[in-house]
Amino acid sequence: NKLQQVWLPEKSYTPGSWGYVGGHVFSMKGNTLQKAGTNKNILGTGYDPIYATQRVGLDDFKLDVPDGKYQVTLLFAELLSNKEREALAYNLSNAAQKDETVHRSFDVFINGQKVLEGLGDDNYLEPERAFSVRYTIDVINGKGIDVGFKPIKGESILNGVQVKRIF
């Protein structure tokens, strides 16, 4: 791929490993051909497949990694919007598509420290647009990395996590 990286599908957290805690897989309502994610064009990125799937309503994303310095990048995209899209040739229902409008806002924490406050549709979560943030953190005392989500309005979302050990 263009990034020269391998992206792994999500999995449930188990001690000694990594994964999500809570939530459910995003799926488009009424889409019987695609069970998870979306087929929408996600703006602001050339890597739509990374942003086209999402965990909704999660509590945490945990990584049991060795002590050290890490770069953690969180990837988000609001996949629901009230934009009407024309029917596509491969859409067998032949009807225009329109999602429900969603309003969400949530805080994000890394190892207990708030890193994003009130992330939502009234600031950085624009419909069908990629948004990512990167943090450098020190992992100490064998605690690993815990990305926590606290909903304020609606449900929290996460499209992807990238973790690189710096040293």
Image: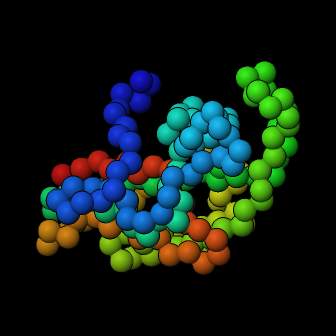
Image side of residue 132 versus residue 154, left or right: left
Image side of residue 166 versus residue 113, left or right: left
Could you say which is closer to the camera, residue 40 or residue 126?
Answer: 40
Residue at 63% x, 33% y is 33
Do we see residue 72 in this rendering?
yes
Q: Is residue 76 above or below residue 103?
A: above
Residue at 38% x, 48% y is 10
Could you say which is closer to the camera, residue 87 or residue 164?
Answer: 87
- Residue at the farthest top position: 89
**Percent x, y of residue 6:** 34, 33
Q: Quadrant of residue 113?
A: bottom left
**Percent x, y of residue 20:** 37, 59
**Percent x, y of residue 124:** 65, 59
Q: Is residue 31 above or below residue 79?
A: above
Image side of residue 129 versus residue 83, left or right: left
Could you say which is closer to the camera, residue 19 or residue 7?
Answer: 19
Residue at 30% x, 59% y is 13
Q: Quadrant of residue 88?
A: top right
Do we see residue 132 in this rendering?
no
Q: Where is the N terminus found, in terms of image quarters?
A: top left
Could you say which is closer to the camera, residue 121 or residue 26?
Answer: 26
Q: Quadrant of residue 45?
A: top right
